[in-house]
Image: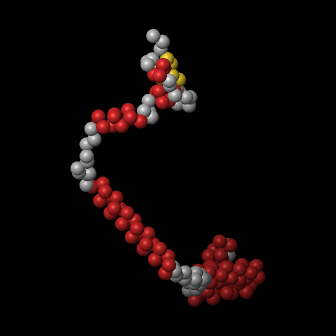
Amino acid sequence: MKNDVLERLLIDRAAGELPRDVEVLLESHLEREPAARTDALEIEETLRLARLVLTEQPVVTPLPSQKTPKWVWAMAACFACGLLLGMLVVRERNVQPMVGVAAISRSAVTTASEQSNFWSIQHFQGASSATAKLPNHVVWASVFKKPEILQKNL
């Protein structure tokens, strides 16, 4: 008997799909040839292990349930309420334009700055009465350097 035919018959026999009369003939052949008998045992063992692996339910250990503590939900609720309240406050401020803004006259602003003389060049120089009469020219070459005051002599 050819090896490939014998192997197919052994697989069918191990699977239980071989007709009874063919199985009897195969048994008589296996009794006469010990090498074929060892092949038959190997095939039967392989199919037994394959069935065992395929039919067994996988063993999966369930993870322990982790319940979320109540304080986490409380913190999330506080965060959500604060976020909602903040959005409402910002919306209320941005929706309504400011009405009734008082207009300030330009003369009131200039007189206040003229009175203090804080932002003037004379204050910056610490100028005396002699230099205050000369027109000055401020040169600011760079943001990183102090501005230079150039005096024009008349």
Q: Is residue 22 visible?
A: no
Asked where in the image residue 118 lies, by quadrant, the reply is top left
Residue closest to the eye, 11 or 146: 146
Relative to 102, does residue 113 appear above or below in the rendering? Answer: above
Which of the image's four quarters has the C terminus?
top left
Q: Is residue 88 visible?
A: yes
Which of the image's four quarters has the N terminus?
bottom right
Residue closest to the eye, 84 or 6: 84
Asked where in the image residue 21 lies, by quadrant, the reply is bottom right
Relative to 94, does residue 131 appear above or below in the rendering? Answer: above
Q: Is residue 61 left or right of residue 111?
A: right
Task: Give the residue at x 73% y 86%.
Answer: 31
Residue 50: horizontal and vertical position, in percent? Answer: 63, 79
Task: Give the residue at x 68% y 73%.
Answer: 3
Task: Give the residue at x 53% y 23%.
Answer: 148
Residue 92: horizontal and vertical position, in percent? Answer: 29, 59
Residue 138: horizontal and vertical position, in percent? Answer: 47, 23
Residue 45: horizontal and vertical position, in percent? Answer: 68, 82
Q: Residue furthest left?
A: 100
Asked where in the image residue 119 lies, by quadrant, the reply is top left
